Image: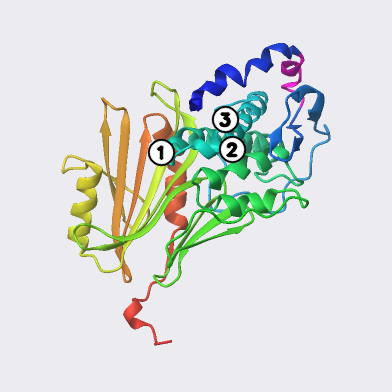
Amino acid sequence: MSSWCDYYNKEMLWVFVMPCFMRFRELGRYAVNKMNKLFIAFICSLMVVSVTIASEPPSEVPQQGYTTGILREPVFELSQVIVEVTALNRWLNSNYEKLTYEQMKGPREHLYYLIDSYVKNLYANDKRIIPEQHDLILDVLFSWAERLGVYGGALVYNSLKSPESAEMPTLMKLPDQISIDLDGDLLTISANKEGWDVKIPYYFMIWNVDDFRATNGMRMQLVALSTGAAADKSEAGRSQSTIMLVYSPDADIYEFSKFWNQAMGIDNSAEEITIDSGNRKSLHTYDAGAKLHKEIVIWREPRGVFAVAYLAMDGAYQWSRPHLLDFLRSLKVKRESPHDRLPD
């Protein structure tokens, strides 16, 4: 099997025999026909320029509860997204069945760089993050999301697919007490029995959902996801930021804090940052050698102890941090203790 990055050397060679492609980069959004799961081999002849008349603004605010102010400066310009989607789709059709879960990490992250870039281009043009009509690019991108290990990917694909296409089954099994639902352009992650839920934009990448007992005996529910992509100071020059939510219904907050601060590598020298008007404070540390920021906020609710951690490379940390704050505001927790509830 060819390596994940080989598609740059093989699948993208066709670009150089299509100089007409780049002439259209500023003319609007493009749609690409696909037949079954195979993308086109000759994209120029099938590329359609969008109508130049501006579309009606959306009736609802996009990604309600999350700022749209950072839906700009995509990693890839629209013309490059088209090229990359075509090449990635061809490579995955040839190699997907041979990939181990560990080998899916690179294609999965690249897939979401493309999704994020496409969403940002869409927002810049139409002030919406979901197209008004069926969109072949998002159709193809999300057709791979769950197959590459992203929770909720099938939900998004089924909402975006052509009416003629078959529904995609759920491949990523969730813990019994946690569910994911899609409402418009937001995914809701819920633990109904434990009384918490959080909403995130549909283009965030949920790559871990678990319900387990830690080595110290504490029961924990964990959700880990990646935000949109941003330029950073790493060698690659771009990255996603990671948000992790942890809940424990029966943990002592001191032991819980000690466990997660040690796991994150955060010590007493960490900077304190006031998070919100509720006087929650996070601990923040920066590893200059790795150019990595780590931030965690831990607090108690009547139903248990919560932690939200944020890890990001320098540059991406500052850019995407507003979505960390939006995530914290979006997290809803029932205030009564589970012991206060009447029996069913």
Q: Quadrant of the C terminus?
A: bottom left
Compare residues 338 and 157 and report the one nearer the observer.
157
Which contiguous range is marked in magenta?
Answer: 20-27
Identity of the residue drawn at 44% across and 23% down = 237
Image mark for residue 115: 2
Residue 247 image point, x, y percent? 33, 61
Residue for badge 1: 102
- Residue 106 magenta: no
Comes first in the chain, label 2 or label 3? 3
Query: Is residue 38 something one can see in this rendering?
Result: yes
- Kindly identify the amino acid type of the residue bearing the numbered disc 2: Ile
Identity of the residue drawn at 40% across and 46% down = 243
Q: Is the magenta stretch mostly helix, strand or loop?
A: helix
- Kindly identify the amino acid type of the residue bearing the numbered disc 1: Glu
Image mark for residue 74: 3
Residue 190 image point, x, y percent? 47, 63
Q: In screen coordinates, is 326 left or right of 127? A: left
